[in-house]
């Protein structure tokens, strides 16, 4: 099991198994990515790779550094990270774990508990259909099925061109507008099945 510590010197301190022995060494970020085959860096895609600084991670780090209370900030940081990256990759989760001092197991637990968070890349337009009780009884299922038909996707899937992701949410807290559809940050209320095609066209 790899144990890694992020430091500001541009180095990893890592312990790993090699020839049935525990080896501890310090490496440049790219070198350790390749050596222990944890994350295939390939041209500097790793979040801490010095050969290609990542402005998205800088933005997230600045956000975290600006927090007065980091202990109770996990959900807020995850929201910010997903807004920046579109999804929560392993790189992002390790980064947050290091910056907040929170075990990765706890972060994964939060991500899997809240349906809003995703660990898979999502399309340019994320279409969320609320399936909470109020929305469901007012026809949300029919709306979701129409989106599936129009986009040729199943709920939870992303189109091959990475343009659309279709998903369902438990509740968005806008029951008076049921059924509700949210496309990125735009909210559509009292959506009917015959409005689905128009909503999709607005994304093109």
Image (cartoon, rainbow, N blue to C red):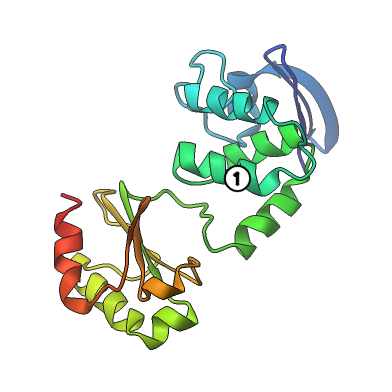
Q: Quadrant of residue 155?
A: bottom left
Query: Total number of numbered labels?
Result: 1
Q: On screen, 170 above or below 67?
A: below
Image x and y of residue 16, in percent:
78, 34
86 with respect to 59 (left or right): left
Residue under the image location 36 percent in, 51 percent down: 184
- Residue labelled with disc 1: 78
Q: On screen, 20 above or below 164?
A: above
Residue under the image location 36 percent in, 60 percent down: 182
Query: Judging from the image, what secondary structure is the residue with disc 1 in?
Result: helix
Q: Quadrant of residue 76?
A: top right
Q: Nearer the viewer, residue 143 or 176?
A: 176
Mark 1 surroundings within 10 Å by alpha-carbon count, few (fewer than 14), some (14 through 19), many (20 or more):
many
Could you tell me if residue 127 is visible in this image?
A: no
Residue under the image location 51 percent in, 54 percent down: 118
Could you tell me if residue 68 is visible in this image?
A: yes
141 with respect to 115 (left or right): left
Q: On screen, 60 above or below 80?
A: above
**Which residue in the rendered view is the most extreme toward the bottom?**
137
47 with respect to 73 (left or right): left
Image x and y of residue 149, in percent:
20, 74
Image x and y of residue 70, in percent:
76, 37
10 with respect to 103 (left or right): left
Q: Nearer the viewer, residue 85 or 77?
A: 77
Residue under the image location 37 percent in, 72 percent down: 177
Image x and y of residue 12, in percent:
72, 22
- Please state, as top left, top right, bottom left or bottom right, where the N terminus lies in the image: top right
**Which residue in the rendered view is the most extreme toward the front?**
176
Q: On screen, 29 above or below 105?
A: above
């Amino acid at each position: 099991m790899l144990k890694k510590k992020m430091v500001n010197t541009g180095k990893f301190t890592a312990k790993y198994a090699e020839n049935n022995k525990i080896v501890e060494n310090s490496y440049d970020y790219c070198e350790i990515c390749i050596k222990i085959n944890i994350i295939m860096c390939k041209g500097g895609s790793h979040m801490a790779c010095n050969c290609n600084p990542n402005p998205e991670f800088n933005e997230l780090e600045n956000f975290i550094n600006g927090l007065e209370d980091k202990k109770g900030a996990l959900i807020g940081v995850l929201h910010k990270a997903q807004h920046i990256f579109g999804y929560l990759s392993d790189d992002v989760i390790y980064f947050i774990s290091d910056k907040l001092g929170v075990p990765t197991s706890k972060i994964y637990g939060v991500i899997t508990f809240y349906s809003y968070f995703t660990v898979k890349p999502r399309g340019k337009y994320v279409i969320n259909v609320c399936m909470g009780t109020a929305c469901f009884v007012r026809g949300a299922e029919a709306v979701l099925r129409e989106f599936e038909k129009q986009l040729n996707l199943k709920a939870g899937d992303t189109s091959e061109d990475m343009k659309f992701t279709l998903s369902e949410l438990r509740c968005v807290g806008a029951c008076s507008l049921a059924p509700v559809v949210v496309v990125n940050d735009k909210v559509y209320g009292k959506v009917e099945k015959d409005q689905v095609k128009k909503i999709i066209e607005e994304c093109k």
